[in-house]
Image (spheres, grey):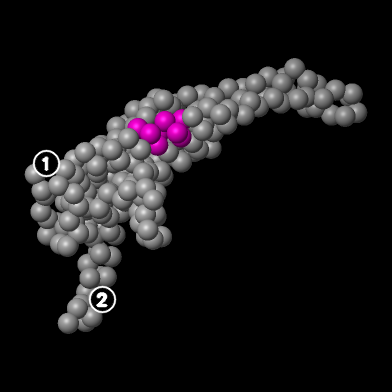
Amino acid sequence: MVPLHFSHFQSLLLFALIISLAFGTLGRRKPIARVKYAAWSFAMFVLVGIALGWLMYPFSR
Amino acid sequence: MFEEEKDNQAEGLEVSARAGEAAGPADGPSESAGTATAYVIEEPSVVRAVAVALAGWLLPGLGHALLKMWGRALAIFLTVGFLVYLGAGMRGNVFAPGGDDAFARLGYIADAGTGAFYFVARALEGAGSDVSHAAGDYGTRFLATAGVLNLLAALHAYEAARGRKA
């Protein structure tokens, strides 16, 4: 298969999107609640990921 | 949908309970009247629930499909499948059984959580893994996440089959 190349941020976005969709589908019953929960999970994944990245920034050099 | 069946089942239990009350004395069951009202609630089969969970583990989404939870079945199948495809495409490490250290053994358990998709991942990675780059390392995490997510979905299917969660 063709090797896939993603940047760090693209990988983060892909991971957050897929897992958020799964969490929303598994965790809630009603469609509106699923969308809200998935959106909330996605936002938290991305925000916490970026925050952790900045927290580790001083140790990278 | 299973949710609707479950709701109907719950309503049915309430109806039978009300029927039991109606069959008894007008002021409800009492010991002084010498009668007792028994409510029989059938427990969902444990064997069936375990079979559903095993099916869900072997083929992602199958457990929920057996419970007629079509949306969740499709979502699990697609998310686990897509994670495996991405992980293999990024040349993540698909751990083999019998690893040397605890990390390799845990990695194998996580990867094996994808069930049949574990063999798909091995087949897709014809050139083997390459974790010398960040993409390969991310691919390893994607594959492990796919397995853990599928195990979580199988547990969810088990709970749903027991009637505890939907």
Q: Quadrant of the C terminus of chain A?
A: bottom left
Q: Quadrant of residue B118?
A: top left
Principal secondary structure, stretch drawn in magenta: helix
Which residue is nearer to you in this view: A19 or B26?
A19
- Residue B55 highlighted magenta (yes or no): yes
Q: Which residues are magenta?
A: B52-59
The mark nearer the N terminus, 2 or 1, is: 1
- The residue beneath circle 1 is A1
Q: Amino acid at mark 1?
A: Met
> Picture quarter containing residue B36?
top right
Q: Dot 2 falls on which chain?
A: A
Residue hosting label 2: A55
Along the horizontal axis of the image, is B21 left or right of B164?
Answer: right
Foreground residue, B122 or B4? B122
Residue at 18 percent across and 49 percent down: it is: B128
Of badges 2 and 1, the one in the foreground is: 1
**Residue B50: horizontal and vertical position, in percent?**
51, 33
Q: How many circles with numbers are drawn on the protein? A: 2
Camera-side residue of B60 and B100: B100
- Type of amino acid at the residue the image marks with label 2: Leu
The x and y percentages for residue B65 are 37, 27
Residue B89 position, x and y percent, is: 16, 47
